[in-house]
Every structure is written in structure tokens, then in C-alpha cells.
Image: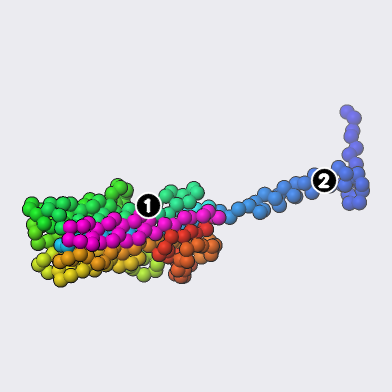
């Protein structure tokens, strides 16, 4: 058998031009590929939490029903860095301006963006004015039915449109000529002229209750709005407004036109501080809670992830 004498001197001499020609470019190319793999790539996506509360509704005029609370929803989503998140914050509805006029619906709150699931919280259902047997409006939570007739009127339906988990509850009907129904709250349906309670949430770092229903108007005495910004009913005069930035419904009055409107909604984000870009529009309030930035929108705007 013929012996092959392999000359290793080409490998042993670092300055040998043949060695450079044969092996240098391959080694350099391989090293470039290793450095290029993963270098300069985009940052991975991250998760944020959001609370989306719509505007509460206005109460009915005269001995009118309480306004329903704005819809209450939460979301946890994964977002790509650089995504523009559009934020719409719903305003509160106006209350009736005459004995027989209805309140108006609260406005929706929405978050949306490329690659995200759009979340919409529906505005609260209007409180019915002093109409015989007339029901309250449907919405995030239902509005209270009016007084002015027998039999009892019906309250508006909550969680309209339907989502899971439910964004709100039903309003109550009015009873005869004396009492209108309360508006539903995020957690609890209205009972008689008492507004339903809202839901507590600690996204900001402390517990705050949102989306309470307004109390119904009555000749027999004041009524109570639900916790979470629901306005109380006032037998002696104008309605009490729902609380701003909590999505509470307005309370009804016992006589004359109402003056108070539903409370405006709010959208709040909880974002890891390491991922917070600081790029926003609409002038949200930004605070820090541990390792997170809390970005609170009380008006419409945007946030860049």
C-alpha cells in the first residue's frame, strides 16, 4: 500500500500564505456568523395588565331612574415592543333635563393595537325619566326604570353587549308613582332604588372601587348610589353626579329636572418598568409601584409599548 505523507507544516506556520489562503476566510466567515446570530435582534415581547372602565350613564329626569355604571373589564396581554396602543376613555352621560326626559348613555372605553385583542367596555345604560312603566336603558350596567305608573317598570340589562366575564349587572325597575329604580353596578345589580355596587381593583397599588350604579329618584327620601362612584338619589332636588374617572352612574332626583351626569371612565396600564418606553400622548398620569409603571388615562391618547 502506498503511504501518503501529509505535510503539517502548512498548519504549523501562521504566516504561511498557503495556510492563510486555504483556512483564513473560512474561519473568519464562521466567526462572523456566530457573532451575527442574535446580535442586533429585536427585544422580546412582554406582558402588560390593563383596567378599562367606561363612562357611567345619566339619570332620568324628574323622579327618574339612576344611571347604570360604565362597563368594567380587565385584560392581560402580550405586546411586541414598539406597538402603538390606542386608548379611548369614555365620558359620562348627561341626566334628563325635564320631568319626562331620559338620561343619556355613557360612552365606551377601548384599548386596541396591532397584534392585540381589542377590549371595549360599554357605556352605562341610561336612567329612564318619569314615564309610565318605561324601562331603563341597556349597557355596561343597566339603567334604572322610571316611575310614573303601575305595574312596576323594568330595569335595563347589564353586560350589553355580552362578554365574559360580565362587564356589569342589571338595573332595577321603578315602583308605582313614588320610586324609580337604581342603576346596576359592576359587581351587584340594583335593588329597588339603591344602586348596585362596583368592583374593587388594585392595579394602581392600592384598592380602588370602580363602576357603581346611581341611586333611583324617589318622593319618599334619598337613595343610595353603589360603591364605586355611583351618585346618590336626592328626593329634594337635583341628582348627584357619578364620580369622575370611576365610571359611576348618576343618581336620580325626587322632583324636577336632574343636574348631575354620569362619571367619566378611566383606562389604567400596569407595565414592567424595564419595558416602559415613556412615549405617550394624551397626558396620562405616570406613577411607580415597585417594579412597575402605572399609566393612568383619564382622557383619550396612546401609549407606545
Residue 152 at x, y percent in the picture: 10, 53
Disc 2 is placed on an element classified as: helix
Name the residue at 51% across, 62% down: 280
Look at the image and say whether residue 241 sits in the magenta stretch.
no
Name the residue at 91% across, 44% down: 18
Q: Nearer the viewer, mark 1 or mark 2?
A: 1
Residue 259 at x, y percent in the picture: 24, 67
Name the residue at 42% across, 57% down: 88
Q: Nearer the viewer, residue 49 or 108?
A: 108
Crowd rating for badge 1 (residues with CA inside 10 Å; few <14, some 14–19, many 20+): many
Residue 239 appears in which quarter of the rendering?
A: bottom left
Crowd rating for badge 2 (residues with CA inside 10 Å; few <14, some 14–19, many 20+): few
Residue 273 at x, y percent in the picture: 51, 65
Residue position marked by numbered label 1 in the rendering: 120
Farthest front residue in view = 98
Left or right: where does residue 244 sit relative to residue 290?
A: left
Residue position marked by numbered label 2 in the rendering: 25
Residue 287 at x, y percent in the picture: 46, 70
Quadrant in the picture for the N terminus:
top right
Name the residue at 52% across, 58% down: 304
The answer to whether residue 170 is seen in the rendering is no
Left or right: where does residue 260 sit relative to residue 291?
A: left
Farthest top residue in view = 1
Q: Is residue 170 above or below residue 287?
A: above
Residue numbers of the magenta segment: 81-109
Q: Main secondary structure of the magenta part?
A: loop
Q: Earlier in the sequence, mark 1 or mark 2?
A: 2
Amino acid at each position: 500500500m502506498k503511504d501518503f505523507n501529509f505535510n503539517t507544516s502548512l498548519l504549523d506556520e501562521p504566516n504561511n500564505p498557503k495556510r492563510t489562503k486555504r483556512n483564513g476566510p473560512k474561519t473568519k466567515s464562521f466567526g462572523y456568523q456566530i457573532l451575527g446570530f442574535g446580535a442586533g435582534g429585536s427585544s422580546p415581547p412582554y406582558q402588560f395588565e390593563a383596567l378599562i372602565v367606561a363612562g357611567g350613564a345619566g339619570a332620568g329626569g324628574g323622579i327618574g331612574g339612576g344611571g347604570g355604571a360604565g362597563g368594567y373589564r380587565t385584560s392581560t396581554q402580550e405586546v411586541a415592543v414598539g406597538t402603538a396602543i390606542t386608548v379611548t376613555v369614555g365620558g359620562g352621560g348627561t341626566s334628563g333635563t325635564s320631568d319626562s326626559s331620559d338620561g343619556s348613555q355613557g360612552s365606551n372605553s377601548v384599548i386596541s393595537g396591532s397584534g392585540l385583542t381589542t377590549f371595549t367596555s360599554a357605556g352605562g345604560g341610561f336612567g329612564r325619566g318619569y314615564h309610565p312603566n318605561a324601562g331603563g336603558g341597556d349597557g355596561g350596567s343597566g339603567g334604572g326604570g322610571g316611575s310614573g305608573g303601575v305595574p312596576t317598570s323594568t330595569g335595563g340589562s347589564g353586560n350589553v353587549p355580552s362578554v365574559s366575564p360580565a362587564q356589569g349587572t342589571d338595573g332595577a325597575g321603578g315602583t308605582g308613582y313614588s320610586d324609580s329604580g337604581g342603576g346596576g353596578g359592576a359587581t351587584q345589580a340594583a335593588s329597588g332604588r339603591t344602586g348596585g355596587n362596583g368592583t374593587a381593583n388594585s392595579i394602581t397599588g392600592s384598592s380602588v372601587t370602580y363602576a357603581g350604579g346611581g341611586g333611583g329618584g324617589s318622593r319618599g327620601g334619598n337613595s343610595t348610589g353603589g360603591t364605586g362612584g355611583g351618585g346618590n338619589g336626592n328626593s329634594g332636588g337635583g341628582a348627584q353626579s357619578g364620580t369622575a374617572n370611576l365610571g359611576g352612574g348618576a343618581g336620580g332626583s325626587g322632583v324636577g329636572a336632574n343636574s348631575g351626569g354620569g362619571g367619566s371612565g378611566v383606562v389604567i396600564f400596569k407595565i414592567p418598568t424595564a419595558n416602559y418606553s415613556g412615549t405617550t400622548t394624551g397626558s396620562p398620569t405616570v406613577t411607580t409601584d415597585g417594579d412597575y409603571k402605572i399609566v393612568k388615562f383619564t382622557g383619550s391618547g396612546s401609549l407606545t409599548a
